Image (spheres, rainbow, N blue to C red):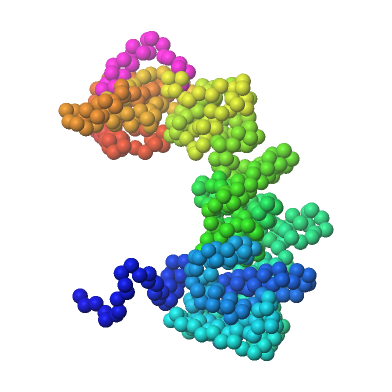
Amino acid sequence: MTLPDTPLSPAGADRTFQVDLRGLVDLLSHHLYSSPRVYLRELMQNAVDALTARRRLEPAAPADAFGIRLYADGSVVRVEDDGVGLTEGDVHTFLATIGRSSKRAEKIAEQRADFIGQFGIGLLSCFLVADEIHVLSRSAATPEVPAVEWRGRGDGSYTVRTLPASARPRPGTTVTLTPRADAGEWTRPAQVHTLARHFGSLLRHPVTFDDGTGGPGAPVNPEPAPWARTYPTPGARSRALAAYGAEVFGFTPLDTIELDLPAVGLKGIACVLPESVPAGRRHGHRVHVKGMLLSEQAEEILPEWAFFVRCVVDAESLRPTASRESLYEDDTLAAVRDALAERLRAWIARAAASDPDLLARFLQAHHLAVKSLAVHDDEILRMLLPWLPFETTDGHSTLDEFARTHRTVLVTSSVEEFRQVAAIASAAGLGVVNGGYTYDRELVHRLPEIRPEVSVADLDPATLTAHLDPVDRETELAAAAYLALARDALAVFDCDVALRTFQPASAPALLMDSREARHERTRSQLAREQEGGVWGDILGALRQEAPRAQLILNQLNPLVRTAVSIDEPELARTSAEALYGQAAMLSRRPLRPAESSLINRSFLDLLAHALRKDS
C-alpha cells in the first residue's frame, strides 16, 4: 500500500476532521429526516425563531407587525421573514458551522430556549431538494450594519459578501432555493402550500403563501388553534373542538377532552375513538411545539393503556429530538405523560359520575383499555369494575349484576375451560366467569374489594364434579363393564371415565381437562421417554403426579344410555372413543394429532359396524 505524498504532522499534534458535506447531506436524507418534505418545515421553523427573537427586541410592536411570506412558482421556493436577521458574524457562526459543541454554543442553546430549533443543522435539509441555498439577511439588532448574502453549495463550499442597505430595506431574512429537477414532487406551488398548512396551521405569527400568479397571498394559518378561540356557549365550544378532531383524524369523536397543562404551556384536545381498537395498538398523536407541527406519530406522549384516544396538542416546553420529528425522552416528557394520563382518568370519573349514557357507550367500545387501567389503578377499579362487561354463565353481564345472584363467583383460567363447563355449570346453578381473556381473571379476583359479601375462587374441576348427581348403584353396576372398556380405550390420553347425571340432558359427555394438566402429562411422558439420560433426570426432578383428564358421561342422555348397554367389546370401545372425540371438539380447544386420528377412526369403525349389521 502506498501512502499519499502529504506532509507529516509532528507527533501528538492536534488534527481537524474533514467533513464531506455531500455525505452528510446523504446521511440526513436517509437516516435523520423521514422525507425531503421537511425542508419547508425547517425553513419555516428558522423564520419563527427569527420572529421570536425580533419580538424580544420590540415587545411593544403590534401582534401582526411581523410575519412570514412563502413564495413558490415552480422555478424557485422562497421563504421570507421579518425576524431579527443576521450580521456577517452571525452568518459565519450559525450558517457555516455544523454541529458546534463548544461552551459558547451551549450558552447560545440556553439563550434559545424559547426557540424551536436548537441544533444548527436544519438549513442543511434544503440540500435534499436543491444544490444551492441563497440567504439574504439584514439585522434588526444592529440596523446600521449592511445586509449580508450567503450562498451555500452542496459540495461544502460557500461565499459571503456584504450588500448595500438597499438590497434589503427592512430587517429580516430571505431564503431562496432553486429546486433540482428530481425535487418537483416537493417544490410545486400547490405542494408547497399544502406543506405550509400541514406544518404551520397553528403558528402564532401570520403566514401567507404566494404562487406567483399575481393574486393576493393566501393565509396559511388564518385562525388561531380551536382551543384558543372564544365561543358563545360551552356547547358551541364542544362542537367546534369535535369538528376539529374529525377534520384532523378523520373520525367523529365519541367525546373530546380538553387538555391544559400551564406548567409546560401545553394545550390541546384528546379525541375518544368511537370504536374499539386491538389491545396494544398505539395510535400516533399530533404534537406541535410552539405552533410548529413536530410529529403526527408521537406515541410517547401518553401511556400505553390510553390507546382509546388520539391527541393533538401544542406545547411550549417539550424538547424535540435532533430530527425535530419526535420528542426527546426526559423528565419533562415523563411529567407531561403522567399529567395527561391524570386528565384521562378524570374524564372517565366524570363520565361515571354524571353521564351514564356516555360511560356505557365508552365501555362498550373500550372496555379492554379500561380493564388494563383498572388492574393498576385502584381508583378506576373501585369506580368502574361493577360496570365492566364479562362473559359469564348468565351471558354477558357486569360483575355488579352477576354478584347479585351469585354470592360465590368461580372464575376459569382459560377460554376453553369456560366453554367446556359453561352450559353444565349454568344448569347446576353455579356462577362462573370466563377468566381467559386479558385482565379478566385478575379483575374478577378483586371483586371482593368492591363487594365484601362476595367470594371469588378459581374453578376447580372437583367443584363442578361435586355438583353433578351420581347415578344409583344398580345403574352403576350395570355400566361397570362398559366403563372398564372405555377407561382402557382412553388410557392413551390419561383419561378416566365416570358416569353421572346432569343438565342439560342434550349434553352426552363433559371432558374435564385443563391446559395445565395436559402440559404436565406431556412433560411426564417426555420424562419417561428420556429416562436414564441427563435430560430425563432434569424432567424427573420436575415431574409431579400428572393430573388425569376425566370424561364424565351423562346418564340422562339417550346416546349414553344406549352406549353403556353395548355388550360387544370392540363396539363399546369405539363408542367410548367417539364420545371422547365429540367432547373434545365441543371444548373448542385445539385437538392433538392423536385425538384427530381417534375421531376419524371411531367414525369409520361405527360406519363399518352399521354396514355389517345391515348386510
Q: Is residue 541 above or below residue 36?
A: above
Q: Which residue reaches farthest front?
A: 10
Residue numbers of the magenta segment: 464-488
Q: Which residue reaches farthest left?
A: 532
| Residue shown at the point (49%, 37%) measured from the top left | 437
The answer to whether any part of residue 462 appears in the image is: yes
Location of residue 610 by image quarter: top left
Whether residue 612 sits left or right of residue 326 in the image: it is left
Q: Is residue 586 above or below residue 25?
A: above
Q: In this view, does 73 lie above or below 543?
A: below
**Camera-side residue of 382 and 563:** 382
Whether residue 33 sits left or right of residue 377 in the image: it is left
Q: Which residue reaches farthest right?
A: 232
Q: Where is residue 296 in the image (x, y as percent from the top left)?
A: 57, 61
**Camera-side residue of 14 and 81:** 14
Location of residue 148 by image quarter: bottom right
Q: Where is residue 399 in the image (x, y as percent from the top left)?
A: 60, 31
| Residue shown at the point (27%, 35%) measured from the top left | 594
From the image, which quarter does the N terminus lie in? bottom left
| Residue shown at the point (54%, 66%) measured from the top left | 105
Q: Where is residue 318 in the image (x, y as percent from the top left)?
A: 60, 57
Location of residue 562 by image quarter: top left
| Residue shown at the point (55%, 58%) measured from the top left | 327
Image mark count: 0
Q: Is 480 in the magenta?
A: yes
Magenta portion: prevailing SS class: helix
From the image, which quarter does the C terminus lie in? top left
Whether residue 423 sits left or right of residue 361 in the image: it is left
Q: Where is residue 304 in the image (x, y as percent from the top left)?
A: 54, 47
The answer to whether any part of residue 427 appears in the image is: no
